[in-house]
Amino acid sequence: MTVGKSHNKIFDPVYMHFDFDDYKPDLMMRVEPTNKNKPITYVLHRMVPPGKSIYFFTINHEYFYAKDHLKLQNRVSLLVKNVKFNEVLEDDGRPPDSDDDEEETEFSYMIKMINYTSGKPKEVLNKQYEPIPRI
């Protein structure tokens, strides 16, 4: 997700929620640009099953979709209930004081617009089982 293309606000933490994980939040890492003219991006590296998958983002527990990703509009809002977050930051943006005090909060979302993957698998190994570099 790219700030300015996908979303205009800069907040941490940013989570990505996939349907195949029952919308469990995956924390995305913030990547600061090396060039001041480039936007801040958030990345998440993970395996995704073949076929189409739907996903959305949350920032500060608010639902968002990426405007620059594939998207579809639901005819009826999709209700995603009881999404559990283990808080990784305090309200003021600091890391939690200790792991013992980790809070779990639940949220539900009414989703009208949602992102989806293309469903086209990408090879990660060649015929000699060597990794295929991606640039």
Image (cartoon, rainbow, N blue to C red):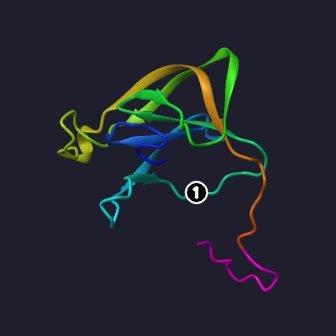
Residue occupying image coordinates x 61% and y 40%: 21
For the residue pair 48 and 4, the one nearer the viewer reads as 4
| Place of residue 76 in the rendered image (x, y in percent of width and height, measured from the top left) | 68, 13
Asked if residue 3 is positioned above or below residue 133 in the image, the reply reads above
Q: Which residues are magenta?
A: 125-135
Residue occupying image coordinates x 44% and y 22%: 107
Residue 115 location, quadrant:
top right
User: What is the magenta segment's predominant secondary structure?
Assistant: loop
Q: Amino acid at mark 1?
A: Arg
| Place of residue 28 in the rendered image (x, y in percent of width and height, measured from the top left) | 44, 49
Residue occupying image coordinates x 45% and y 48%: 2
Asked if residue 15 is positioned above or below residue 120 in the image, the reply reads above
Q: Residue furthest toward the bottom?
A: 128
Image side of residue 75 versus residue 37, left or right? right
Image side of residue 31 versus residue 135, left or right? left
Image side of residue 83 versus residue 104, left or right? right
For the residue pair 102 and 29, the one nearer the viewer reads as 29
Residue occupying image coordinates x 58% and y 57%: 46
Image side of residue 89 versus residue 115, left or right? left
Asked if residue 75 is positioned above or below residue 133 in the image, the reply reads above
CA neighbours of label 1 inside 10 A, class few (<14), some (14 to 19), many (20+): few
Q: Residue furthest toward the top?
A: 76
Quarter of the C terminus within the rendering: bottom right
| Place of residue 78 in the rendered image (x, y in percent of width and height, measured from the top left) | 64, 19
Residue at mark 1: 46
**Secondary-structure class at tag 1:** loop
| Place of residue 110 in the rendered image (x, y in percent of width and height, measured from the top left) | 55, 17
Asked if residue 40 is positioned above or below residue 35 in the image, the reply reads above
For the residue pair 38 and 31, the one nearer the viewer reads as 38
Q: Residue furthest toward the right?
A: 127
Tally of marks:
1
